[in-house]
Image (cartoon, rainbow, N blue to C red):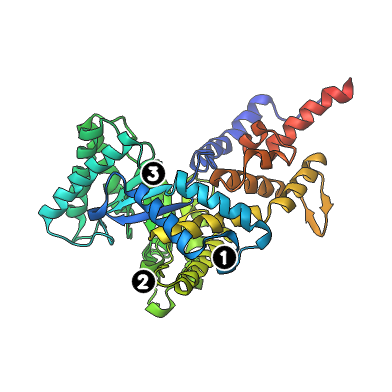
Amino acid sequence: MKTSLSDQEIRSTAAPLEASLAKFVKRFPGESGARQPVHTVYGGAQLFKSNTTQRLGELALRALEQNAPDAATLAEAIGLDPAHADVVYARVVEKLKREPVEDFRIDFEDGYGNRPDDEEDKDAELRARELATGVKNGTVSPFTGIRIKTFSQELMRRGIRTLDIFVTSLLDALGELPPWFVITQPKIQLPEQVTLLIDLFERLEQKLGLAEGSLKMEFMIETTQSILNERGGSNLPLFLEAARGRCVAAHFGTYDYTASCNITAAHQRMDHPSCDFARQMMQVAYSGTGIWLSDGATNVMPIGDRATVHRAWRLHVDHIRHSLINGYYQGWDLNPAQLPTRYAAVYSFFIENLPAATERLSNFIQKAGQATLVGDVFDDAATGQGLLNYFLRALNCGAITEEEALMTGLTLDELRSRSFVKILQGRRANAAPAAAG
C-alpha cells in the first residue's frame, strides 16, 4: 500500500504532541483507587489523646441510642426511605463500634486558637506523643494528621515551629510517620505559601532522615483569592504546581469562604450558591489529578433535647446529600453526635440507588457497550464509567458489600480495574476466541 509519509516522518511529526501528552498524563493520572475517607473530624489539639477517636465512637453510639434507638426513629428523623432503614441502621451501628472515625485532624488552628508560644510548644510535643501512643495501641483513626496555623505575616513562624516540634516529636516517639499522615495548610491565598511548606518538608526530611516525599499536605480552599487571583486567573492549579507532587487532598472551608464573600452569618451555609461555585471551580481544577476533594462542615450541632437533635441531624444529612450529589464524597464533622448521620447519609445515598444501578450496569455490560434502554433511563457509552464509579464509591465507603457489587455480573478484578473501557476490552477479547471456536 502506498503512503505519502515515511514512518520516520510520522514519528517526527507526532513527537511534539506525544511529549505534551506525556506531561498531560503525569499531571492528570486519574484516581489512584486508594480508599478515601468519608469525613475528617477536626478537634482542638489541646484535647487530643491517644484514645480520642474511640471516645468519640462511644459518644456517637450514645447519641444514636438516646435520640434514635431504632431504625424507624432514625428514618423519620432524617428522611430515610423506610424500605432501607433497617439495613442502613445496622451498618451505622456496626461502623460506630468498629471504626467510628475514619480521618482525624489534630487542629492547631481555629480549633486551638492563639495561645502563648510556650503553651503551643508543649502541646505540639505532647499531642505528637499521644498520637504515637495511639498508633502503637491501635486506637487512632486509619487516616490522621495535623492542621497548622496559616502562613500569614503574623502566624507564619508559629505555624512553622509547631510543624517542626510535632513531626520531630512524633518521629522520636514512634520512629516513623503513621500511615496516611498529612499536614493541612489553611487559608491559602498565594502559591508562595504552598512553596514554603514544601520547602520546609524537604528540609525536615533531610534533618530527620525521612525518605524524600514522605511528608504530604492538603490544601484548605477557603479564601476568594484561592479561586481567583489579582490577575483574573485561578490560583488552584498554581497551588497544585507549587505542591510538587505532595498534595493528596483539597478541603473546602465553608465559613471562612462565605465570610470572605461578605455573606452575613445568618446565610453562611453549606449549600449557599457561592459555595457551589467555589466547589465547582475546585472540581474543574483538580479533576483527574488524583487528589481527593472534601466539603466543609455543618456548624449546627446536634445538642439538646431529641427534637433539637433531630433538626440538626436532618440539616446535616441534607448538607451531606447535597455534597454527594455534586461529587464531593468527603466532608468535615465537628461533633461526635454527627457521626451517626454522616454514615447514615452516605450509606443510604448508595443503598437507595443500588437496585437501579445494578440493573443498568448489568444490562450495559451484557450489551458490551452498545446503548441500551432500561426502564425510562437511556444509557450511552459515557454513562458506563459513571455507573462503575457509583459501585467503586459505594464499596470504598462501606455502603455496600462485595457480594452486592458482584450482582452486576462484574468480577472483583474488573471492578478493581476502575475502567469501564478496560472491562469492555477484556470481555471482547475473551469473546473473540470463543466466537472463532
Q: Position of residue 51 (x, y in %)?
A: 31, 45
Residue underneath mark 1: 73
Q: Looking at the image, is mark 3 or mark 2 earlier in the sequence? A: 3
Residue shown at 68% from the left, 48% from the top: 387
Q: Position of residue 205 (x, y in %)?
A: 25, 34
Residue underneath mark 3: 141
CB contact under 8 Å: marks 1 and 2: no
Residue underneath mark 2: 260
Q: Which element is circle 2 on?
A: helix
User: Which is in the foreground here, disc 1 or disc 2?
Assistant: 1
Q: Tell me the distance, in whole angstroms, between the alpha carbons under discs 1 and 3.
A: 29 Å
Picture layout, residue 125 above or below residue 327: above
Q: Quadrant of the C terminus?
A: top right
Q: Tell me the distance, in whole angstroms, between the alpha carbons under discs 3 and 2.
A: 32 Å
Please state the total of marks drawn on the protein image: 3
Residue sticking out furthest to the left: 118
Residue shown at 62% from the left, 46% from the top: 400
| Mark 1 Cα shell of 10 Å, populated few (<14), some (14-19), many (≥20) | some
Q: Which element is circle 3 on?
A: loop
Q: Position of residue 221 (x, y in %)?
A: 39, 59
Q: Looking at the image, is mark 1 or mark 2 earlier in the sequence? A: 1
Q: Nearer the viewer, residue 222 or 373?
A: 373
| Mark 2 Cα shell of 10 Å, populated few (<14), some (14-19), many (≥20) | few
Q: Image quarter for residue 72?
A: bottom right
Tell whether 98 sits left or right of 79: left
Tell whether 158 sits left or right of 380: left
